[in-house]
Amino acid sequence: MSRRTVCIVFVALALTATGCNNKPAAPAAIKGNWVDAWQAVPMGAMPNGCGGRGAEAAFPGNRASSQSARFAVRATAAGSAVRVRLSNRFSSRLLAISHVTIAEQTTGAGVAAGTTKDVLFDGRKTLTLGGGEEAVSDAVRFEVDPEHPVSVSVAIASSGPLTWHAVGSDASYATAVGSGDHTGDTSGGAYRAQLHSYIALAGLQVDASVPTTAIVALGDSITDNPQQDLGRHWVDILGSRLRAAGIHRTVVNAGIACNALVSADNSTGPAAPSRFVEDVVRRQGVSHVIIFEGTNDIYGGQTAAKAIAVLTALADRAHVAGLKVIGATILPRRDGPVPVKDDQRAEVNQWIRTTSSFDGFIDFDAAVRATANPLQMNPGYASDDIHPNTRGQIAMGNAIDLSLFER
């Protein structure tokens, strides 16, 4: 597939502006069973107030200069070919890519000998992205499956402020400034900086072995893998359960740490409405969206009415694009109710459970709340006051009714 230039539009709460021409851009019709199978949504330009210190140290001045980065990627569908999506969405400067490869991951930054393949863009190894642009690569014959991570390596000749995803689930790595192209290295020796962030890499599409569609999980840090045990996060568990049940849908993570429905700044990434088209509607093969946002709004001082208005607008926008919309209730805090704010949370949750705006809902609140005090997160499920631990994430993943995604 040839290079695709994307116009990024920040959308008002009513979602009246949805793209470059005020219409949703549906994925182009293509041959094969192409579907988005992994995503690290661009959340802004480095740096960011919600994490990513390792990446900031590896890229002085928030720019890359003749250096390489290597990322672990776990596709959520098996397939025989892949396409890589790169992003310069939040920069006003050129991003000059000199080489991209994909290979089977071994240990750390190492890859398996003989598995490395070039990733080309319009038949070329090099790619230059202008400010605000993204590109999807040509198809690469490469076998993937959900049980085995792959490594995507990106050599950057030069850049402005880097578009990134600050907090990643897998380890990622970078070489030193001026070290050049190490995308073909089998050894990970040159990749001495460990990041836990994704730089320029935004997604992976797979030519699935059977017709498959994508579920996009739109959320905040509870969705944006918080570096817990790999495979035991609620998004991962949902994917595993769908595969075991023979339901052919990928689960694509669109979580951003600190994200919200209403407010946005350099610590939170763009608010959910302003990124909805790019991170949800434009994903290849998307059929469903799970909307799991609101805790940062309610506990940040927004009203239930404001949160419900945005959730309604998002649901309407998804339906216009032909997507099924699944709501998810807001979790209680570990230390129990907060006056006024918890009343607002209860109002939003009651609306999610009863509204006709959604095609169904997931009751994450019920999955993790304490039996003795329903206004408190089960202490055994809490990592901190806000986030579930691994046990809590497992409870959330297992609480999802798979029939929501059977049609």
Image: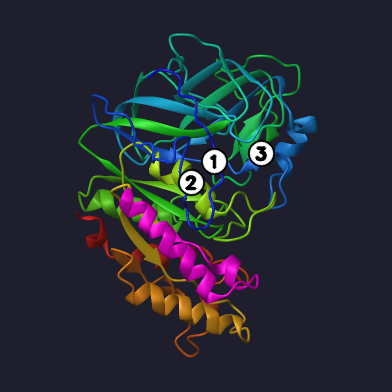
Q: Nearer the viewer, residue 371 or 2?
A: 2
For discs 2 and 1, the disc positioned in front in the rendered view? 2
Residue corresponding to mark 1: 9
Of circles 3 and 2, the one toward us is 2
> Where is 84 relative to 212, above or below?
above
Q: Is residue 19 above or below residue 13?
A: above
Identified by mark 2, the residue type is: Ala
Which residue is label 2 attached to? 17
Q: Nearer the viewer, mark 3 or mark 1?
A: 1
Residue at x 45%, y 75% (from the top left corner): 368
Dot 2: element: loop
Q: Can residue 112 be seen in the rendering of this structure?
A: yes
Q: Which span is picked out in magenta?
A: 291-320
Density class for disc 3 (Cα within 10 Å; few <14, some 14-19, many ≥20) is: many
Residues at marks 3 and 1, CA–CA distance in whole angstroms:
29 Å
Give the spatial CA distance, label 2 vs label 1. 7 Å
In the image, residue 165 above or below residue 388 = above
Q: For residue 251: magenta?
A: no
Residue 148, x across and y down, in percent = 40, 36
User: Which residue is at the front of the view, 169 or 19?
Assistant: 19
Dot 2 and dot 1 residues touching (CB under 8 Å) = yes
Q: Quadrant of the C terminus?
A: bottom left
Q: Indicate the quadrant where residue 220 lies.
A: bottom right
**In the current view of this chain or complex, which residue is farthest to the bottom?**
372
